[in-house]
Image (spheres, grey):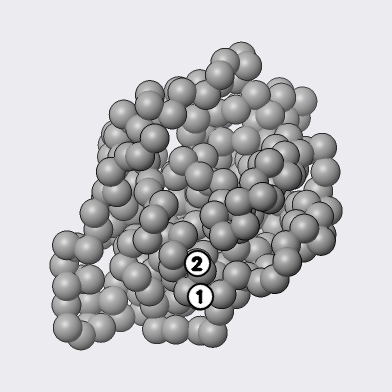
Amino acid sequence: MCYPLYETRLLPYLQSSTNEFRHEMFKKNKTYKAIVSSDWNQCLAPCGPFDFISFNHPELGPDLKAIFQYYTGNIISLGEAIKKIQNLSPASITEDQMDAYLNKSFTTYKGVPELIEWCLSNNILFMLNTTGVIGYFQRIFTKGLLPEVPALSAHPMVRYPKSDADPWHVYDLFETIDKGKNTGSSIRSFNIPLNKIIIMGDSGGDGPHFEWGAGINAFLIGNMTKPSLKRYCEAKSIAIDVQFGPFYAGGEVTDLRKEMQVNFMDLAPIIEDFVDS
């Protein structure tokens, strides 16, 4: 089933013939009043972190899906998952192969690019903090498929040569527990107030990030919340502040059509209320 790509190429900073807007938005000494640190897969986009591999090597699809479910369900560590994937994969994915996947399959949930742009235009740092790979996002930003963000935390299993479109700060993520550590590093780098931290996630793989956030009274948003995140948070006595989109914590079958009807710009007033409180 195909869904429309929410077009971002018409955004003014991507149309500009110079980097003036980008450098103004992302200069290292820019002041941000808050941060949104968010997972990506099945949280902002209806895809898995290793779909680019199965796109180029379809025979690996079932194994990759199972590995994803194992570590997001906290059955194995991310490090163990990556080792399994590297043992399966015949070769590294080239930039051309990644581009072929993105040209055919890239999409987000409705309103995600607009929410990122809204946050940045309101001096709220938007950070992608995911178990996906760095190279995937490098090609996304180079191709102008998303607004460029100041900070990225992702796995270095696939990483391409640095380009002007890369975020100012790129943090390596080797285990899910690194999400909190990397959010903390970004907070320090950009001098974000400690009482203005927002964390978004969907599965048990985001559990350690939520646990870290709960320890500093961050605002926690569950997007398309899965049973694995509910179990993790209940076991750690973590209260999620907002449940956004379909709620699957009771074990319901995921409903992609329903998910694609959710507009992430509906989070803007929720974020704004927290930031201005």
- Tell me residue 48's x, y (percent): 56, 46
Q: Is residue 219 left or right of residue 30?
A: right
**Secondary structure of the residue carrying numbered label 2:** helix
Rendered position, 252 above or below 141: above
- Tell me residue 22's x, y (percent): 28, 76
Label 1 sits on what residue type? Glu
The quarter holding residue 8 reads bottom left
Of 198 and 31, the residue lying toward us: 198
Q: Residue furthest front?
A: 59
Q: Crowdedness of circle 1 by 10 Å Cα count: few (<14), some, many (20+)?
A: some
Residue of label 2: 98
Q: Is residue 25 left or right of residue 102?
A: left
- Tell me residue 188's x, y (percent): 56, 67
Residue 103: in sight, yes or no? yes
Q: Are marks 2 and 1 in contact (CB under 8 Å)?
A: yes
Which residue occupies 60% across, 63% down? 133
Label 2 sits on what residue type? Met
Q: Quadrant of the N terminus?
A: top left
Rendered position, 265 above or below 96: above
Which residue occupies 22% across, 76% down? 21
Disc number for residue 95: 1
Which residue occupies 68% across, 50% down? 60
- Distance, label 2 to label 1, CA atoms, is 5 Å
Of 80 and 103, the residue lying toward us: 103
The quarter holding residue 130 reads bottom right
Which residue occupies 24% across, 54% down? 7
Q: Crowdedness of circle 2 by 10 Å Cα count: few (<14), some, many (20+)?
A: many
Of 85 and 15, the residue lying toward us: 85
Rendered position, 247 above or below 128: above
Q: Is residue 96 left or right of residue 123?
A: right
